[in-house]
Amino acid sequence: MNMINLLLFPIIIPFFFAMILLFFKEQVVIQRVLTLIGLVLSLLASFWLIATVKADGIQTVTLGNWPAPFGITMVSDMLSALLVTTTILITFFVVLYSFQSIGSERERFFYYPAILFMITGINGAFTTGDIFNMFVFFEVLLIASYLLIVLGGEKRQLRESIKYILVNVISSALFVITVAYLYSIIGTLNMADISVKIAEINQPGIISVIAILFLIVFGIKGAIFPLYFWLPGSYAAPPIPVLALFGALLTKVGVYAITRTYTLFFVHDIGFTHEFLMILSVLTIVAGCIGALAYFDLKQIIIYNIIIAVGVILFGVSQMNTPGLEGAVYYLIHDMLIKGALFVLIGIIIYVTGTSNLRKMGGLIKTYPALGWTYLVAAFGLAGIPPLSGFIGKLLIVQGGFQAENAFGSIVILASSLIVLLSVMRIFIYAFWGAPEKANVLPSIDAAKYRHMMVPAVLLTVVTVAYGVGAEWLMPYMSDAADVLRDPSIYINAVLKE
Amino acid sequence: MELMLSILIGVLFTAAVYLILSRSLLKVILGTGLLSHGAHLLILTMGGLSGSKPPVLIDGVTDFADPLPQALILTAIVISFGVTAVILVMAYRMYAVHKTDNMNELRGNDEHD
């Protein structure tokens, strides 16, 4: 076999290193070093993968050398290659941040292996070309996330993780049920083959029902409007590095799955399915905005911003035209990066103030200027102030909305940007301006630890700025990704005509 | 046969929903178990129960059973077994810490844990 196995590397390498780490339970230093080596190797492999996909088109490998619709196919188009790379990049920085903040108790109880197993599942879900295999990779990442969310065993963590697990178990059962229905009608599980077969029978009503079932399944994981109820409580329970990983990566897997199924399978009755998706995504934005303004808790404000972003991305997907899809891809990756950066930054704010309640903070800009200005850049990036990274994605999505004559949704997105800006600026004003609170003069702040925590935060913010400023240079990659979404036949030909 | 199984699946889902909506955490977990049993049987039924011969190439046999749903169920059973084990352990730990298995008493919010 030649380079065709390349697309498996970002899945296999974290898995392999996670297994090795299991043998070094007590040796924290060895664990840290091995985790970093594993992530750097995966990162190199994923950059190589992007270059290969850019040069040679979609990469596929069918496991066991069965011909395409029968064996399990792994497919790496530009969208999955970019998402895999972003996932590993964010994990790398969050792991750097964890060295300082997670604490040795958690490090000695399989924290790093759990992260690497979760990356295995996430990258697998991004790469797979088989709908049942996607369920399996979802379970891999979910089981690792069950461990991460409960690790530490605090009272609140235990309470919230039970709810998190129950919601996900029910949605997984629903996933299996939906795949069973699809199989009974289509008789295949290969995603490219499903797309062909649905086109052959011209998407009767029952397929649209299955489309909505898929939306419910992935909507629970991706936190769209009526199904996001579990997210704010559960995500606030684990420590900040875990929250950063969950917030940046896990909901995006659900968003990716909706994007993939709604651009590859259910493209023949757009008037119903995509209209429904669009309405839900606008409602998601509104619900997220209400939440982001309602709380005085740092974590909750940023967590509700996840929900807003999910709505914005899915609105772009539901437009089904070139600017909308390009914008959705661009904004999806922007949001993963910026959420990672913001969660790490508020983690540092919480560390230096000892609280996550905005009312108890103030005057940090005098003592921690670097933290303040980095946060401000990240906050402007999230709100989409040009030339930072949120701007181009939103511009394209809004343009797509106007082009598809859904001006109302575009206006909601534009208005939501202001609310996003207000919600993150409120953190800046309350935490950094004003007089220092007497209550939060903590003598125990370790200056060296603070500096070490700032390194990944600043680097991640620099990456997001580069992602915004370098948009012109990145655009060919984004349009490659959007082309496959817009025209399913590219994907189908790559998988089936080999 | 398909009709019988469909009714059975319906009964399993009904019982699962009833149990999941109850207040006791243990009943909720049993409910998720029944839910996944129902889902597994559903895969089997949806694949069709018509074939009567094993799916191995033998001359003169055309009436194969569909092997794919069986492979899928096997995978799904293993996964749901593992997840149920994880939930049970976690529920036990939660019971030990919170001294209750009543879901109504596990609401909590940010202000007071």
Image (cartoon, coloured by chain):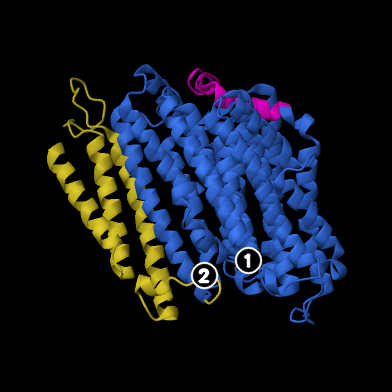
Chain colours: A blue, B yellow
Q: Is residue A129 visible?
A: no
Label 1 belongs to which residue?
Answer: A297
* Chain letter, disc 2 residue: A
Query: In x, y percent, where is residue B77?
Result: 32, 51
Contact flag, marks 1 and 2 (Cβ < 8 Å): no
- Write down the region rendered in magenta: A476-498
Residue appearing at x 63%, y 33% in the figure:
A397
Query: In x, y percent, where is residue A389?
Result: 74, 41
Given residues A255 and A409, the one toward you in this image is A409
Q: Amino acid at mark 1?
A: Asp
Taking the image as shown, residue A28 lies to the left or right of residue A170, namely: right
Give the total number of marks visible in the rendering: 2
* Chain letter, disc 1 residue: A
Q: Relative to A307, is A405 above or below?
A: above
Q: Is residue A57 visible?
A: yes
Residue A116 located within the stretch drawn in magenta:
no
Label 2 belongs to which residue?
Answer: A157
Query: In x, y percent, where is residue A93?
Result: 72, 54
**Corner quadrant of residue A291:** bottom right
Given residues A67 and A315, the one toward you in this image is A315
Disc 1: CA contacts within 10 A as few (<14), some (14-19) or many (>=20): some
